[in-house]
Image: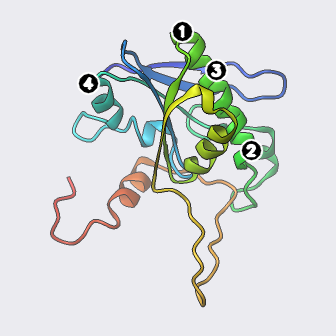
């Protein structure tokens, strides 16, 4: 198990501060980009039986970074957050989130002295990482997308509606994590 170092990346004028965590190593830098449901503490850094995915990557020699988008986990809440009630329209969009990722990548490169990082993005974070990659290819060693958002045409299926924001507890995270595990498979 690693000891994560957590810092706050200061925002420029009008930008929220972002929580950034790191499991430092001399190996290649990898930044985890979370999805729309869970911040880094409840995804890549969440420990099951004392061990997280972040710990595993670090054990394998990677310099592992993760951050929380504005409005998630330990990052500041953006201005639109206080104006949008729970259940209201989402305020965060991929272009805004991509600017946050740009800040984090710049911070990682400045801290490590490297010229490139790898991004590992999940779900909604794949949209953000893809947008970032399209504008900053020179800063990327690798781009890994898992569980990417894809448009699906399904006649007769209702359109999904998501709230602008909601609180997610550890119990919510665990429930969501195991909801698709087939019956009879050990969950924990």
CB contact under 8 Å: marks 3 and 1: no
Q: Are marks 4 and 3 in contact (CB under 8 Å)?
A: no
Counting residues from the start of the chain, the first of labels 4 and 3 encountered is 4
Specify few, some or many for label 4: CA neighbours under 10 Å numbering under 14, 14-19, or 20 or more.
some
Q: x and y percent of residue 135 in the render?
A: 70, 37
- State whether residue 75 appears in this view: no
Q: Earlier in the sequence, mark 3 or mark 1?
A: 3
Question: Mark on residue 106?
Answer: 3
Q: Nearer the viewer, residue 29 or 54?
A: 29
The residue beneath circle 1 is 113
Say which quarter of the image contains residue 51: top left
**Image quarter of residue 175:** bottom left
Residue bearing mark 2: 95
Earlier residue among tags 1 and 4:
4
Could you say where residue 108 lies in the image, as x and y percent from the top left? 55, 18
- C-alpha distance separating marks 3 and 1: 10 Å
Q: Which mark is residue 39?
A: none
Q: In the picture shown, does residue 120 fall above or below 115?
A: below
Q: Residue under circle 4?
A: 59
Using a 10 Å C-alpha cutoff, classify the residue at mark 3 as few (fewer than 14 neighbours), some (14 to 19) or many (20 or more): some
Residues under labels 1 and 4: Cα distance? 21 Å
Count the labels in the image.
Answer: 4
The one nearer the camera, 26 or 65, is 26
Q: Residue at x 79, y 21 (%)?
A: 12
Dividing the picture into quarters, in which one does residue 179 lie?
Answer: bottom left
């Amino acid at each position: 198990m690693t000891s994560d170092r957590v810092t706050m990346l200061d925002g420029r004028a009008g930008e929220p501060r972002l929580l950034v965590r790191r499991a430092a190593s001399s190996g290649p830098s990898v930044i985890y980009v979370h999805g729309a449901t869970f911040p880094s503490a409840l995804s890549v850094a969440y420990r099951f039986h004392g061990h997280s995915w972040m710990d595993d990557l670090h054990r394998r020699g990677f310099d592992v970074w993760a951050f929380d988008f504005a409005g998630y986990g330990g990052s500041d809440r953006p201005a639109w957050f206080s104006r949008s009630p729970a259940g209201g329209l989402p305020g965060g969009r991929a272009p805004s989130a991509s600017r946050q990722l740009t800040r984090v990548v710049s911070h990682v490169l400045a801290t490590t002295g490297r010229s490139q990082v790898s991004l590992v993005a999940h779900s909604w974070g794949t949209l953000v990482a893809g947008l970032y990659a399209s504008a900053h290819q020179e800063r990327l060693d690798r781009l890994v997308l898992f569980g990417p958002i894809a448009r699906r045409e399904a006649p007769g299926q209702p359109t999904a509606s998501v709230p602008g924001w909601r609180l997610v507890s550890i119990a919510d995270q665990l429930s969501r994590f195991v909801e698709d595990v087939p019956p009879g498979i050990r969950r924990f």
